[in-house]
Image: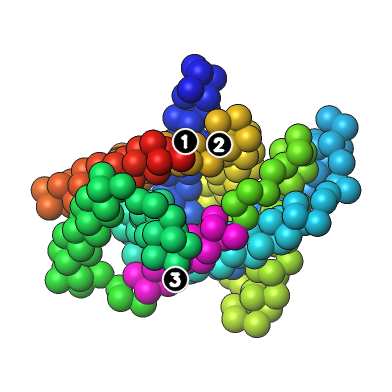
Amino acid sequence: MDIRAILAGLAFALMWSSAFTSARIIVADASPLAALTLRYLISGLLGVAIARALGQSWHLTRAQWRATIVFGILQNAVYLGLNFVAMQTIEASVAAIIASTMPLLVALAGWLFLKEMLPPLGIAGLIAGILGVGLIMGTRITGGVDLDGLLLCGIGVVALTVATLAVRGATSGGNFLMIVGLQMLVGCAALALATVLFETPHLSPSWPLLAAFIYTTLVPGLAATFVWFWLVNRIGATRAATFHFLNPFLGVAIAAVLLGEQLGALDMIGVAVIALGILAVQLSRQKAA
């Protein structure tokens, strides 16, 4: 793995992890589905416009269109839509911890349903990750966390897992930014329908809301997705996913610094165990591959 890939992986982990804090700020002053719909509209149009300016094509292969639609609906609409709704009642750090279990769920699903080999180190990582999540969620549940919010985040990470498994093997063919932009627009269309059906939009204008919206639109929304696709095409999905082990640490750290969310000793132990579990799983899958 070269230095450019390492730096890209670190940048992706930081941007991805920061999205939960910016989302928490947004949903405090705006309706979640409507805000996310507008975010994807802006991000998608910017992505497509920049891609066209760079000479990228929207004439995708059938596999690319399938991956774009599946990922746009399951990740952008279902996963992030449910997380935005959930963060009206749960902390950003909790949502980040649940979302960071995605690599564990991908490995588990591949092992159980796709008959993929998982070495002993990977199995140990899965067990560690599950124990870490159980430790954190146990303390949060006894502390009175909103169970409906937890459930929405849980459904969201399952949708993200299915999306990740469904699009494996589909490549961008060099149209990195075009595919990112089109995925955003697919998510925008799905969320616009959900907004009409399930939400009465509201808005309380504030400077934190504006700053968080601009940031989440351009950085986690557009830049992080582009960096991820670039990284996957450069070093492969298995090796790129190793950087996910940083997400539990970064997610809770950013929420603690910017939102003042409190973390107890058991929370920190759980985060460390989850991160080590993710790292063990990804290293074992990398070795097997």
Task: Label 2, secondary structure: give it.
Answer: loop
- Percent across and percent down for residue 84 are 49, 63
Please give the label number shown on residue 236: 2
Q: x%, y% of residue 286?
A: 42, 38
Q: Secondary structure at mark 1?
A: helix
Q: Which mark is residue 239?
A: 1
For mark 3, give the secondary structure: helix
- Along the horizontal axis of the image, is 60 left or right of 242? right
Magenta-colored span: 149-166
Q: Residue at x 75, y 52 (%)?
A: 64
Of the two numbered discs 1 and 3 in the rendering, the one whose residue sits closer to the viewer: 1
- For the residue marked with disc 3, what is the amino acid? Ile
Dot 2 or dot 3, earlier in sequence:
3
Depicted 181 relative to depicted 13: above or below: below
Q: Is residue 104 left or right of residue 191?
A: left
Q: Which is closer to the viewer, label 2 or label 3?
A: 2
Q: How is the image coloured?
A: rainbow
Q: Residue at x 76, y 38 (%)?
A: 173
> How far from the left and from the top, in percent, is residue 79?
52, 63
Residue 288, by quadrant, is top left
Q: Is residue 199 magenta?
A: no
Q: Which amino acid type is shown beneath numbered disc 2?
A: Gly
Give 235 or 75, whichever is nearer the viewer.
Answer: 235
Q: Which mark is residue 155?
A: 3
Q: Nearer the viewer, residue 22 or 165?
A: 165
The Cα–Cα distance between marks 1 and 3, rounded to whole angstroms, is 26 Å
Q: Earlier in the sequence, mark 1 or mark 3?
A: 3
Q: Label 3 neighbourhood size at 10 Å, few (<14), some (14-19), many (20+)?
A: some
